[in-house]
Each structure stands twice: as C-alpha cells, then as structure tokens.
Amino acid sequence: MASRLAITTLQGMDIRKLSTMALRLRRHLQWPNAEITDVLALDLIAALPDLPDWSTVVASQRSIANRWLDWACFQRLSERIAECLMITLDPAALVALLTTEFDSIKKIRKRGPFRVVRLAPEYSSIAYLMDTAVRQLKELPDFSGDKGILVTSDFGGEHSSALFNTYSFVFVAQDKSSVFEQEIKELRSKHGLLDTYSEFKFKDLAYGPRSRALPGFLSLVDKYIHGAVVTIAVEKKIETLFGPSKQQAHARLVETLAQKGLGDWTGAAAEKVLRVCHFLAILSSLMLCDRQKMVWYCDNDTINENGKKRSFQDTGKIFESVSDLYAIQKLDGLGFGKSFADKGYMDDILSIADFAAGVAQDLLKGHVTNENIPGGEEKIALIKWMAEPATFLSKINIQISRLENGELGAGLVAITPK
C-alpha cells in the first residue's frame, strides 16, 4: 500500500503540478507509432480533478487548488487513458509515475561538473583515470531525497576472445522501486517465469519465454527505475591499474591484503577485487548522500566466493577500506549480499548489470575489430536499450585504454542508436 500513501505528498491540484504530471504522462505514453500531443496529455490529466478537459481545469484552478489527490483520482485517470488510447495503466503505476518525489521533480538528476574529491599523490592510477572520466559527465542521478540505495554488479570479458574486461554497476533508489517490483511480477507471471524464477541472462537470451518477455522487461527498467547503470570497460592488454607492471603490482596487492587480514588472494583475483571496489567506491562517493543506507548485491563470482582462505566478508571489508579513501559522506548503514537461492526482483536488477556488461563488451570488440556483433533480435533489443536515454535511468559507459604514447587514458563512450 506504499503507493497509496505516496499520494498524500500532493496537497493541492495547482496548475503547475498538474501540467508537470501531464508532461510525465506524455513522455511515458509516447511510442514510435503514436503521437501523444501536449493537448491530449493535458486533457487526460484533467481526469484527476474530475474535469472534462484542460481548458476547464484552467477555468477552475481556484476551486481545485485545495483538493487532495486520492485513489479515486488515479482510477479516473486510468479509465480515461483506457477509453481514449486503449492502453491499460493501473492506478498504482500512475501513482508511482506521477507522484513519486513530486516535490523534488528536479531531483531526478543533478548537474555536473563532477570530480573525485579526495585524490592524493599516493593513489594508484585507477583513481586518476576515473577522475578524468567523471569530469566529462554532465549529469548523475540525484538521490538526495532517498533513504536507501541498492547497488548491483556484474562483470564480463573473462572469456578468451574478449578484448575488454567490463565492470557494470546499477544504482537504484530503493524508496521508489515498489512499482518496478510489482510490474516485474506481473510480466513474469504473464510469460510463465514467476513460479520458477528464470533469470534474464546475457549468455542465454534466446530461451523462448525470456526472449518474449525481454522487450517488456527493458521497458519496465526504463520506466520505473530511478538510478544509473554504469559500465567501465578496461582493455585486457592493460594487465594492472595498480602499478608499473603486473608482476610488481600483484605481488604487492597479495601481500598487502594478507597483512591486513583480508584473505588469501591470487594476483589476478586481487587485481579484480580491487578494481571492482575502487570503481564502486568512487561512483558511490559521487552519487550517495549523508545518512543513507546502501546495499551491494552481487552475483556469485571469484571476488566473493567463500572458501578456506577467504570469504565474501573479506570482500566487504576491502570495499569498506577502499571507500574510506574516497567517501565524502557518512552513511547510516552498509550491507552486502550475494544472489539468493530464492530469487526476487533484486535479481532482476542484477540482470541489468549483466546485460550492460555483456553489451559493452560486444560493442567495443566490434568497434575495434570491425566485425558484426553475433546474436539475434534479443541482442539488437539490448543494444538499442543501451543507446536510448530513459527518463529516470542514466546510462553511462566509460572506457580505459592504452594510448598511442603508451600511457593510460579514460573517457566516456557514447552509444548512439541506428
């Protein structure tokens, strides 16, 4: 019932709020084969104060200014949309779309410039490369009105033919995720993917029910998730981001982690866990705010496996230690989790990171080799999704490469739809 409670944040139906709602509704309903005009969107929104059209709203603005929005308002709007456009949008979805954080509508994104605030001469090149990249960002999600942030992560490029290692992170405002969770359940139920929770996986896109559900899944991600999906691609020929040579850097990383009681790591695993923790710590320092709670939820991977010589707890402690290098905010809580046996909507958000890591690897490899990207309609849908902007979800891609002069460089990668 959280969606109904959100309605009480709107105490009056003034023209400014209603017209902003109309703009949101128009953007949400727009699709390639239909033109939703400003006039039509405004006339639809007139259903909220139970008026026939926008001109009547304008004429009645004094009398409706002190009315409260209640559940019946959104039921009327749902019925009007169905009648005029033959589109079904249930009242709960409309509540989330039109009222979530309404008093902070401009807080969807915050404008740059951005930088890694806490840089020190002794920091490794990974910090300075990320600083170079984030200075190019024009905007990031604004989470200042949120209490809890969920982060999921997934990594790609470990197969022999890959040219890049990819590290994807999805940041989600948990306060606003209830409608996404409900819509995903309905989508899964429709395609027979709910009772046996079949995960969306980049490496297995062609499975019938998941293939048919994929367009709807991607649409729900863009419509109902406020946050960012950030993918960092590092050329595989860059063997380390922590020193002048792989041999020296890995020996030092392994020794340092062991001395600090943070587990027994191989050189390659230490490189990976520290890349992941530095990337995540830097991104968190740019997006999170004081007094928030953060949960990092990740798939099973070499960096979080439990064994005799190290455990997932060690990974969490490494992240906390690395975060201290960059954090400019004080969190109220930090939690860690791995994909549970009983799957849920958090695993669907984890699939977003999996998709982003896989698509970025394929796109960058295709750009370098001039080869066509293998895959069917599902792969095309994912590439288009990565390229198309969303109202609430920022999509950011960063590449770290070795330049012609032998030095390392970093910058943003623009994926443009064709």
Image: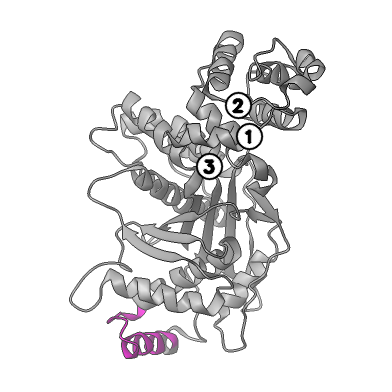
Q: Is residue 271 left or right of residue 199?
A: right
Q: Amino acid at mark 3?
A: Ile
Q: Is residue 334 shown above or below 415?
A: below
Please report whichever mark, 1 or 2, sits nearer to the chain's N-terminal start. Answer: 1
Q: Secondary structure at mark 2?
A: loop
Q: Secondary structure at mark 1?
A: loop
Q: What is the crowding at mark 2: few (fewer than 14 residues within 10 Å), some, or many (at least 20)?
A: some
Q: Is residue 205 left or right of residue 32?
A: left
Residue 262 part of the magenta segment: yes
Q: Which residues are magenta?
A: 249-267
Q: Position of residue 327 (x, y in %)?
A: 55, 73
Report the residue at 45% width, 30% height from top. 216
The answer to which of 348 and 17 lies nearer the viewer is 17
> Tags 1 and 2 in contact by the CB under 8 Å rule?
yes
Q: Is residue 226 shown above or below 264?
A: above
Please report whichever mark, 2 or 3, sits nearer to the chain's N-terminal start. Answer: 2
Q: Which residue is mark 1?
A: 10
Within the image, what quadrant is residue 320 found in? Answer: bottom left
Q: Which residue is mark 2?
A: 69
